[in-house]
Image: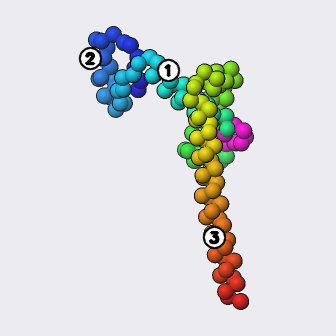
Amino acid sequence: MLLSRLHPSYYNTLLPTSFHARSAPLVEKSCAERDETAAEIQFLTHTIGRVLAKLDLKSTPINTKGYETLLNLVQNTCRDSSDLYNGLFIYNKNSTELIEKLDVAMHAMKKELFGRLHGMLMKQLFESLDSK
């Protein structure tokens, strides 16, 4: 949980007990740091939600909880305006870096998966050649 400037009595009395009851960590940050972190979190969330929306995911009779979470993410993020998402991109100095990191991560996952597939196919090919 992020905090900006609040009255000191709030920090000392109500806040610790309410966060302790929910087991939420208490992190003090300046307003600028809080805004930057919030913008990054929102931009990442909205980007993933909008990428998933491009997949045109549909509910199924056998949805898992994880899949339901993804469907809810799509619904929640795409309900917000494009202006909000564009603003999160334009006014967040780290947004282009985050998009690059997502791209690198996706390529790494594809490389890992296709590398395993290639290894399996090569093994099957050579096993079938050896058995002849």
Instruction: Tell me the distance, in whole angstroms, between the alpha carbons under discs 1 and 3.
Output: 47 Å
Quadrant that contains the C terminus: bottom right
Pick whichever, 88 or 56, lies toward us. Answer: 88
Q: CA distance from mark 2 to mark 3?
A: 60 Å
Residue 56 shown in magenta:
yes
Is 123 rendered above or below residue 74? Answer: below
Give the magenta range.
52-59
Q: Residue at x 67, y 88 (%)?
A: 131
Q: Secondary structure at mark 2?
A: helix
Mark drawn on residue 109: none
Q: Main secondary structure of the magenta part?
A: loop
Give the residue at x 70% y 84%.
129
Residue 63 part of the magenta-drawn span:
no
Residue at (55, 44) in percent of width and height: 65
Q: Secondary structure at mark 1?
A: helix
Residue 22 visible in the current orientation: no
Q: According to the image, label 1 marks what residue?
A: 35
Give the image quarter of residue 120.
Answer: bottom right
Q: Is residue 107 left or right of residue 6?
A: right
Q: How is the image coloured?
A: rainbow
Tell me which amino acid carries mark 1. Answer: Asp
Whole-angstrom CA distance, mark 2 to mark 1, is: 23 Å
Callout 3, which amino acid? Met
Identify the residue position indicated by label 2 in the image.
12
Q: Position of residue 14 (x, y in %)?
A: 30, 17
Instruction: Give SS at disc 3.
Output: helix
Image vertical order of residue 75 relative to residue 66, above or below = above
Task: Report crowding for label 2: few under 14, some 14 to 19, many 20 or more residues within 10 A (C-alpha).
Answer: few
Mark 3, residue position = 120
